[in-house]
Image: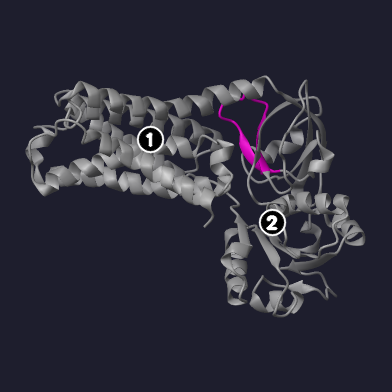
Amino acid sequence: MGRRPAAWIGLYLVLVLAPQALLLLGEVPPGRSFWWNFSMATGFAAMAMMGVQFALTSRIRKFSAPFGIDIIYLFHRYLAWIALGLAALHFALLWLLYPHTLGETFDPRYASWELTAGRAALLLFGLAVVTSEWRKALRLEYGLWRYLHVIFATLGFAAAVAHIIGIGYFTAAPLKRALWLAVTLSWLGLLVWLRVMKPWRQRRAPWRVVEVRPGRNKVWTLAVEPVGHGGLTGFMPGQFAWLTLRASPFGLREHPFSISSPPEALPRVEFGIKELGDFTGKIGEIKPGETAYLDAPFGVFSPAMQPGVEGFVAVVGGVGVTPVMSMLRSLSTQGDRRPFWLFYGNKNWEDVAFREELERLRERMDLRLIHILEDPPEGWTGETGFVDQALLERHLPPAPRPRLHHFLCGPTPMTRAAEGALHAMGVKPARVQTEIFELV
């Protein structure tokens, strides 16, 4: 692990533990049993972790750069379960060992407001986690889920703060209360940054749709250009953007898409978008001249982040080829002669998006293109089936292999199989990079 990732992880631990350390300043409440204090510790830890969740989704580039925002969101997802578990443990310990502290009733009409606030916080946090983990099973449309997630998380956090202040254990002293409120306001400030300040900045820097063209396998290319500003800065091939169409940037209707165009094409930006869900199913209805908003660029899934390597390998499936198109277009424009192996899996030959352009790129760069079809046409002589170690070894150079960097993007079963095969071939984990296909 590099210094920057280690530093950010250290900062995360500080942010989670600092509120508890503040509570030990000054006068400490009279001694209680170990399990009582442990229950208090789990409650405060859960609260701190939930607060830092706002930081993990604030999309501050300096914070996400060492990891990639897809990894940050995955981290956010797993930590939410841990925080919810700590909050549930806090309640369970009190219920089992100190039931008298929970009041005579759970009925909010008669229970004390601070206890009701704590129960509401646990319920709201639980709803935020469950609706995120099983959004598709619950058939929640992406836009509706985003609204619910923000509402559940914000109200749950506010209820937890009210619970802690109302109970007053460890926070009764004015200084401690002020410090805890300051920490709380800093977390809420991150929410304001993401939901108010960022959309306000996007609204002042709009984009215009200049082209929408269909492609194979229902993959559309949507192109936008900046209006009244310079466009993207610091964009590297393989990165992605949060794109808003036919909605206000304040409306929580943004969607993450990989950028398929190279930095050399700026200020024009293109996306490869497949008709799949509620939003993308209508992408073909977008017309040139419509307004778009971008929050970009994000991600570390880029050959520009891998100086000194002797070549690249990409294993992609379906529309997972989109970020790789950005890489190939950029490397081709630069005249880069390093070899690039592209293992491209699809259902059938007609599903191969960007098929003709890939053939043209083979003539302009050292592109080793390996198509893998699940349902090949009659007379097909190429690879069939799925990616495995034997298939990769048939095409990659034998050991000792050159210093290659590997990019994986596509359906999770495919990327897991490819990652396992590469590790079995002796490729170091640091040389295998997976782009998470779906954040939620």
Relative image position of residue 63 (x, y in whole percent): 53, 40
State the residue position of label 1. 51
Region rendered in magenta = 240-258
Q: Residue at x 60, y 52 (%)?
A: 437
Say which of 137 and 176 sits in front.
176
Could you tell me the amino acid type at mark 1?
Gly
* Colouring used for the render: one colour
Q: Secondary structure at mark 1?
A: helix
Say which of 348 and 48 sits in front.
48
Relative image position of residue 360 (x, y in whole percent): 91, 57
User: Residue 280's quadrant in the figure?
Assistant: top right
Relative image position of residue 23 (x, y in whole percent): 23, 34
Q: Residue at x 48, y 51 (%)?
A: 6
| Of labels 1 and 2, the one closer to you | 2
Q: On residue 306, which mark appears?
A: 2
Q: Earlier in the sequence, mark 1 or mark 2?
A: 1
Could you tell me the amino acid type at mark 2?
Gln
| Left or right of 267 on screen, residue 89 | left
| Left or right of 100 on screen, residue 79 | right
Q: Residue at x 66, y 70 (%)?
A: 387
For the residue carrying disc 1, how many other residues have a C-alpha within 10 Å: few (<14), some (14-19), or many (20+)? Answer: many
Relative image position of residue 24 (x, y in whole percent): 21, 36
Q: Is residue 137 visible?
A: no
Q: Is residue 140 above or below residue 175?
A: below
Residues marked 1 and 2 touching at CB (< 8 Å): no
| Left or right of 305 on screen, residue 214 | right
Q: Residue at x 57, y 65 (%)?
A: 429
Q: Is residue 337 visible?
A: yes
| Residue 244 inside the magenta-drawn segment | yes
Q: CA distance from mark 1 to mark 2?
A: 34 Å
Q: Is residue 204 above or below residue 170?
A: above
Say which of 399 and 421 sits in front.
399
